[in-house]
Image: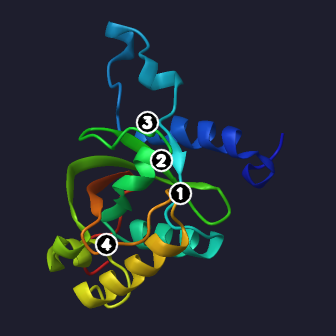
Amino acid sequence: MRDETELDVGEAVQVFWEAARNHARLNPAPAYFGRTPLETVPPPAWSFGGTQEQAGELAALVLDGRKTATASALWDYEAEDEPLPKVGQMSIVLDGHQRPVALIVTTEVATVPFDRVDAEHAEAEGEGDRSLDHWRETHERFFREFRSHERDFDPSMPVVLERFRVLYPKPPKAGE
């Protein structure tokens, strides 16, 4: 039998999904209602950031409970013909080595101009000193460097703000 380090990403996601859905009790009564698609089809798996290093750092912030929000350029969703996140949608977060580390559920979605993102959202992203200035500096750089659309950065560009909650594994409580 192979250990988890030998699994490819798809297999690792499936193994993680089985543990996560059982732990999160996503189908607590299968004997009564039968198997649901939730039991067999894992949610989309993806990583935060644009590099392996960023993916690892941001996944670690999710796991320690500091990161409960993210932001993406609306123009990237449009360029890639991707649907916007929806409240209640689950995702599997991958670390910098493409290993599944967390099951999250989207709790809020809003689209606002870049220059209207507030300090509360910047703090919820959990990065750096958690200030709005830090958020603006790092996200402007990110949106310039990792864009999939043809437009230049614009302070009024629409940004999709997403809040989420970790379902599995549970992040530590304050003071733990």
Task: State the residue position of label 4.
Answer: 125
N-terminal of the two: label 3 or label 1?
3
Q: Are marks 2 and 3 in contact (CB under 8 Å)?
A: no
Q: Are marks 4 and 3 in contact (CB under 8 Å)?
A: no
Residue 37 image offset from top left, x and y in percent:
45, 18
N-terminal of the two: label 4 or label 3?
3
Q: Which of the pair 157/100 is nearer the observer? A: 157
Which amino acid type is shown beneath numbered disc 3?
Answer: Arg
Task: State the residue position of label 3.
Answer: 21
Q: Are marks 2 and 4 in contact (CB under 8 Å)?
A: no
Q: Residue at x 24, y 69 (%)?
A: 156
Could you tell me which secondary element the residue under label 4 belongs to? helix
Task: State the residue position of label 2.
Answer: 79
N-terminal of the two: label 2 or label 3?
3
Q: Residue at x 78, y 49 (%)?
A: 3
Task: State the residue position of label 1.
Answer: 148
Residue 106 image offset from top left, x and y in percent:
28, 47
Which amino acid type is shown beneath numbered disc 2?
Answer: Ala
Q: Residue at x 47, y 24 (%)?
A: 39
Could you tell me which secondary element the residue under label 2 belongs to? helix
Which amino acid type is shown beneath numbered disc 4?
Answer: Glu
Q: Which one is in front in this view, the residue at disc 4 or the one at disc 3?
A: 4
What crowding class fits label 1: few (fewer than 14 Cα within 10 Å), some (14-19), or many (20 or more)? Answer: some
Q: Is residue 40 left or right of residue 156?
A: right
When the figure is inspected, residue 65 is found, relative to residue 6, above or below; the finding is below
